[in-house]
Amino acid sequence: MRNLALLTDFYQLTMMNGYLKHKLDEDIVVFDYFFRKNPSNNSYTIVAGIEQVIDYLENLSFTEEDLQYLRGLNFDEEFLNALKGFKFSGTIYGAPEGSIMFPHEPILRVKARCFEAQLIETALLNILNFQSLIATKASRICEAADGDPVMEFGLRRAQGPDAGIYGARAAVIGGCTSTSNVLAGKMFDIPVVGTQAHSWIQTFDSELEAFQAYAAIYPDRCLLLVDTYDTLKSGVPNAIKVFQELKEKGYQPKGIRIDSGDIAYLSKEARKQLDAAGFHDVSIVASSDLEEETIYSLKIQRAAINGWGVGTNLITSSDSPALGGVYKLAAIEKNGGLIPKIKISENPEKITNPGYKKVVRIYDAHNNNAQADLIMLDDEVIDTTQPLTIFHPIYTWKKKTFNRYKIREMLVPIYEEGKLVYPRKTVAEIKAYTAKELQTLWPEYKRFNRPHLYKVDLSQKLWDLKNEMLNAYKEKNSL
Amino acid sequence: MRNLALLTDFYQLTMMNGYLKHKLDEDIVVFDYFFRKNPSNNSYTIVAGIEQVIDYLENLSFTEEDLQYLRGLNFDEEFLNALKGFKFSGTIYGAPEGSIMFPHEPILRVKARCFEAQLIETALLNILNFQSLIATKASRICEAADGDPVMEFGLRRAQGPDAGIYGARAAVIGGCTSTSNVLAGKMFDIPVVGTQAHSWIQTFDSELEAFQAYAAIYPDRCLLLVDTYDTLKSGVPNAIKVFQELKEKGYQPKGIRIDSGDIAYLSKEARKQLDAAGFHDVSIVASSDLEEETIYSLKIQRAAINGWGVGTNLITSSDSPALGGVYKLAAIEKNGGLIPKIKISENPEKITNPGYKKVVRIYDAHNNNAQADLIMLDDEVIDTTQPLTIFHPIYTWKKKTFNRYKIREMLVPIYEEGKLVYPRKTVAEIKAYTAKELQTLWPEYKRFNRPHLYKVDLSQKLWDLKNEMLNAYKEKNSL
């Protein structure tokens, strides 16, 4: 495991030192991790990276070398001593990895000594923002692929090694079947795939020789790249020759890959040639600057594609390359009680929800579909024997009442006073959980263009608290 | 150093095994790393990441655990044995890190055993594509900031830990003065900066108390965040109070930071308040979803900003989140000679330049300004005592003749038959080199909107070779 103790913004350290000097470092504070806007105008975000946040926290300690570096930045020995024995001792509740979450909902709720809560902010944001971004993008692309396998091919265009590695992991959680990234395959036990590049074809004197050379070694998993010279006049006919040779030897050829040109036209013509030669079961894989809009458009044109290799646009979430997740102070413990805190802004979107909160998902008791989420104060209880009425937090006249419903608390314990209590999962398990969670969403929320907005309301008690605090602030400052 | 041997696409391994089985693994091949398009419609790209490519190659070996994993993927013992003693033994020439390069120019030229050249493709692309992307974005932002210091603040929105770490490095090479990323600061000895977040202000009962608490600990570097409640009615007046207290104690206050609202209006009004209180030397730092267009626009409106903190849009290069660098076969050694190879495409932009090539930059002998680049075959020599005429590779009637000129070969040796021969540099040295290189570019090329296009031509010999190969191919295939 890498030592990422210094993977933080410098101001976290200057503030930590400040809290220490003012003897505020032991004060217990509550921070929420949440985002204000789904990436790519999606209606939901898939939470990914929780396991890596745990890795980070489990390994979080400062080496002598780290301290020496900080000494050089003029931090004093009192501060360095406080870092020396650093071990995360806080309590974290969060949405299980792979959960579907919505804007403004606390996804992680960190309750810890001010000294600790501040340090971990940056790494936590870095890890969760990126992986959640890519899992969500993968989910959109898989939705467009409509059941076809989607392979993650983006390592070469990823934003550095970690982006390739953890991006592949997140892509699989979001629905991809496999990755080309061997290291990610090893680290997370996810399927790796790939056959040959154009350079393989060019190394041989002819395309046919290149195909035959490949088939000789991999007769049982022969997928050939057919677009090096001319897809329909050379690539596909040569592939068919090699497939016939394989078939005579008793092997089942796997397919062809098209990496350039007009995928709709080429795939349909290639399909005709393959079918005419009796290779109905051979698949056609496309890979060429794809993303959800192009895949959807190719589907509408009935492109004969059975599998999609998606690189750059997936691994960077190119249309929306950052999830703007934030980590905001929600409460401070004073004399044993939690005092709610609110961040004011001229921009109403940026005003935070105060207090120690939880998220409750409301399901239709009949079909188990998610109906709405409610952000509530942690000590609130819903009496599910009674109808439940929720209201829009801004247009408060917009109300909805549920009669037959089930509820689920979305945040589960991850750390209890420094002790890891979260059951660690494999990527395959997380992927399966996400797939199940997606089934609870109406298709209206899964449309990747202009989806229906999922309801996230505040409980009456939280709404009252927030509005009281806003009014009190405005009065106090006569603004 | 991390073991990144498996940071590769699976098809590299299947091809390597294929070359081994066909006894082609020892064949010497030449691959070029180049890109076809500058990011963000810039006119140039700053090459960054060479040092990390070297780290990768120096550490490139397979552990027993790696081999065990590959065994599980059905690779045989012959292949695993070939990996066991893997050490890079090839020759690499490349542009020194921090160089300004242009589309289609070889930036790295790898001559190695086919077995090795193939393996390293993915990591090399991953590393260079990302860092070059961010160095270039930083250069654009610094150009807009027009001499003001630009601080890299993006770690929390970076695409994973490495993107934050190596992105900070690349941002400094591209012109940023500092980063908020402490780990990057430690790893690359670059300045780290930061003061306090909104949570610091919220922790205290009032903004004034929060400012005073900060000033008490950091009296000599007091920069205050003034937008938590109301920038002009509360933040700036409170900051001035604290600055006056500092001044009385003999300290020079540093400045204020504005992180929200209309930066142009707020900064001008804040400047008035600060000046009226006699704090002419106190600077105003802005940070709020900035990038080059907004900074330029704020400059036009005469925003009173002295320093810029840039996060998300810099660290992800949000308008252009991937540099599409590729790695293409250029030649294969046969009987001691290099046979040029070309990749054909229906898209003329995607046809490669064949052969073992170099890049020559032509400078005006008077003022040392770069005039044009010429891609040539490696054994070509320019007689600089004679005028030099170059021509556009497509509109060949577009010609230009240089009379008083100097030339420079851009590619320098990095590896000679497996031996590292490149003098390693600090980030500060690379940054200084880049700054000097940028001075050789006319301002027309540095405009970040619709810049003038820099000429990159082919030598007559290379142009002839390319056209002969294209014609021969088309004839052979009667296409």
Image (tube, coloured by chain):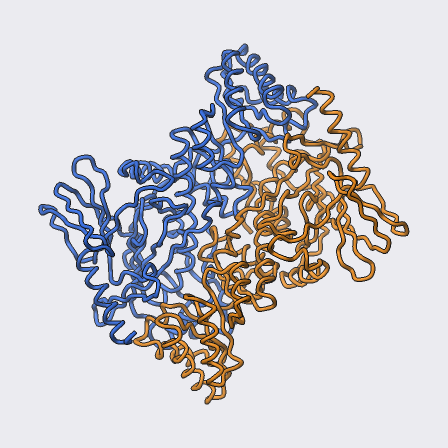
Chain colours: A orange, B blue
Nearest the eye: B477 or B99? B477
Q: Residue furthest bottom?
A: A248
Nearest the eye: B299 or A175? B299
Image quarter of residue B427: top left
Which quarter shows the C terminus of chain A? top right
Residue A472 can be seen in this image: yes
Residue at figure coordinates x 75%, y 25% from the top left: A472
Residue A63 can be seen in this image: no
In this picture, residue B423 sits left or right of residue B160:
left
Q: Is residue B463 above or below residue A469?
A: below
Residue B117 image offset from top left, x and y in percent: 35, 63
Residue B376 image offset from top left, x and y in percent: 21, 56
Q: Is residue A141 above or below residue B369?
A: below
In this picture, residue B192 sits left or right of residue A410:
left
Nearest the eye: B416 or A383? A383
Residue A412 image offset from top left, x and y in percent: 74, 50
Nearest the eye: B332 or B114? B332
Total numbered labels placed on residues in the image: 0
Residue at figure coordinates x 26%, y 72% from the top left: B473
Q: Residue furthest left?
A: B385
In this picture, residue B175 sits left or right of residue B436:
right
Residue A65 image offset from top left, x and y in percent: 50, 39
